[in-house]
Each structure stands twice: as structure tokens, then as C-alpha cells.
Amino acid sequence: MVESHAQTWTTRRGSNPRLETDQLIDIPATPTAVDRNNNFGGLFFFPSPSQSQNVTTALIILSWYVSNIGVLLLNKYLLSFYGYRYPIFLTMTHMLSCAFYSFIAIYWLELVPYQPILSRRQLLKIAALSAIFCSSVVCGNTSLRYLPVSFNQAIGATTPFFTAIFAFLITCKKESAEVYSALLPVVLGIVLASNSEPLFHLFGFLVCLGSTAGRALKSVVQGLLLTSEAERLHSMNLLMYMAPMAAVILLPLTLYIEGNVAGITLEKAREDGWMIFLLLGNATVAYLVNLTNFLVTKHTSALTLQVLGNAKAAVAAVVSVLIFRNPVTVMGMTGFAVTIMGVVLYSEAKKRSKGANH
């Protein structure tokens, strides 16, 4: 009876040919979390880590451009169009803002490790840098009261020329003939732009040159003073120490030269409520220039920052012309272009010179 039952089961099994073949059913594997993120059912796309990194870098570069150009336009608007003709006090608010936000970035957000001042000698060196730093910023802000942003940026593009001069005078550092030759179009371009600038102002031109020379001097002196590993400070820590020192230097100057500027500012704020927001926003953007400068260098390189800076000058000039409608000439634009071309050639020559030395 059992055999009959087994035979019947075999017969019944054999009656369905699909069950006689030993086929393996291919069950799709469960997608991993990465697969689901990259393509969820073919309907949604989530960027990979490398793509996310590229997006982050692009946003940081965009923020750097916006903050750099924004602080220029805000300074120009306040000093020339809004009627707030107090560049020293405006610079002091920038320094106080940089000190406050740098403290938050280092102590609370811990963007970079905190570095203390180790000696009185190091403190004196930082104080010297602060004096050069604040004089450069004051001159730059003062020039915006008399010159259009486009011409201001054309003059500022000659920083490599002054850097090479100060490096030779202070450290006796000589560059190759190719590097010095690349500086010729930098000077030629600014001569062409100056001769054809419709809104040329001699005092504004001179203080803008002073600001450009001050930036170059600061970079050379900084490399000379903070040379040892013990004294070298991260840019964010250096800004945190320099900014309040610069504010202390600027306080007596603004009180002596600009008079009762605090009272005048409060009076203007009572008449126009936007005044306080303009000053606070301007000071905040001034700090963001330094923060995004650090972030761009961290996510790219110092060379990339230099290249982006060359392009930034041209972009800032175009944006300022579109907003403030200051007149420009073909010769002035040509001179600006020649200056930028010279800066690019200088950067390439410096890079080849460093490669040859190593």
C-alpha cells in the first residue's frame, strides 16, 4: 500500500514536466544602502561622495566670490553713495567683527586648533603685522570713496609687482628674469588704465597704491617674522590676534580724524533704521572674506586661490560697472586686461621658477 502510494506520487510528479528539471531560481540580491542612494528605483539620484565633495567645493568658491565682491560693493555704497564718509571707523568695525567671529570659529566651532601666543617677542611681531594690516585696509576703504570699484581692482591687481619689490628690498630675494619680465605688463596695464580712467582722482589713486603696497608688505613681513615652527600661526589664529590689535590702533585715529563718529552714526541710525543693518552686514561680510579665503585654500590649493583671485578682480569690475554705472573706456578696459594677463604670466613664471629650484 505504501509502494502504491509512492508510485502514485511519482506519477503525479512526473505529470508536471516543469517540476522535473532541477532549475535554480535567480532571486535578485537585496540592494545595499549605497545602491539605494545612488539610484532608488531609477527615479531618484543621490550624488556619490566625490560628487558631493565637488558640490561643496563649488559652493565654497561661490561664497568666496560673493563675499569678496559683496564687501567691495557695500564699502563703495556706504562711502560714496550713502554718504557715510568715515573709512577709518568703518575699518574698525571690520576689525572688531573679525575678532569676534574668529573667536567663535576657533573656540566654539573649532574650525582650526587654537594656538596661543608663546612669547612677548611673538606678540610684538603680530602687533607690527597688525599695524601694516590695518593701514592697508584703511587705505583701501578710503580709495573707494574717490575711485570706482573697477579702477580700484585694476590697481589692486598690481600686488605681485610690489611683492617682488619688497621681497628684494627686505630679504634680498632675487627672482628669475622670466618672473621680472612678467611684471612689465602688470605695470603697463595700470598705466594705460590710469591715463584713460574718466573718474581718475589723484588722492584716491595714491591711497589705493598704498593699500596695494601694504598688502604686499604684510605678506613679505609675515613670512619674515613668523618663520620658525614655534611662531608660525594658522591664518585664522593670526587674524584672531591681529584684528583686535588693529581695532585698538584705529580707535584713536578715528576719534582724532573723524571726530564724533559714534554720535554721528547713532544719529544716522535714528534717521534711517537700515543704517545699523548696513554696518553690521558690512562687518560680517568682511569677516566672511577671511573665512572663505581659508576654506577655498583648504579645499583646493593656494595656487587655485591665486588664479581665482585674478578672475575675481575682473568679475568685481564688471559687476560694479553694471550696478553703479560708472563710465569706462575701451583703453581702460584694455589696460585692465593687460594687467590681469601680466598677473597670470607672473603666476606661471613663479611656478616654473619654484619647480626648477626643487
Image (spheres, rainbow, N blue to C red):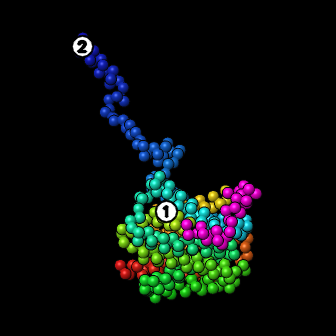
Q: Against 44, is 1 above or below?
A: above
Q: Which residue is mark 2?
A: 2
- State whether the magenta stretch is mostly helix, strand or loop: helix
Residue 230: x %, y % from top left: 36, 68
Residue 328: x %, y % from top left: 71, 77
Q: Against 188, is 10 above or below?
A: above
- Which element type, helix, strand or loop, lies under badge 1? helix
Q: Quadrant of the N terminus?
A: top left
The number of numbered discs placed on residues in the rendered structure image is 2
- Which element type, helix, strand or loop, lies under badge 2? helix
Taking the spot 63% from the left edge, 64% from the top edge, the residue there is: 70
Badge 1 amino acid: Met
Residue 94 visible at all: yes
Residue 151: x %, y % from top left: 65, 77
Viewer-side residue, 160 vs 23:
160
The span from disc 2 to disc 1 (Cα, nearest Å) is 94 Å
Q: Which residue is mark 1?
A: 240
Reply yes or no: does residue 205 show up in magenta: no
Packing grade of label 2 (10 A; few <14, some 14-19, many >=20) is few
Residue 79 visible at all: no
Quarter-wise, where is residue 10 in the image?
top left
Q: Which residues are magenta?
A: 248-276
Residue 114: x %, y % from top left: 42, 59
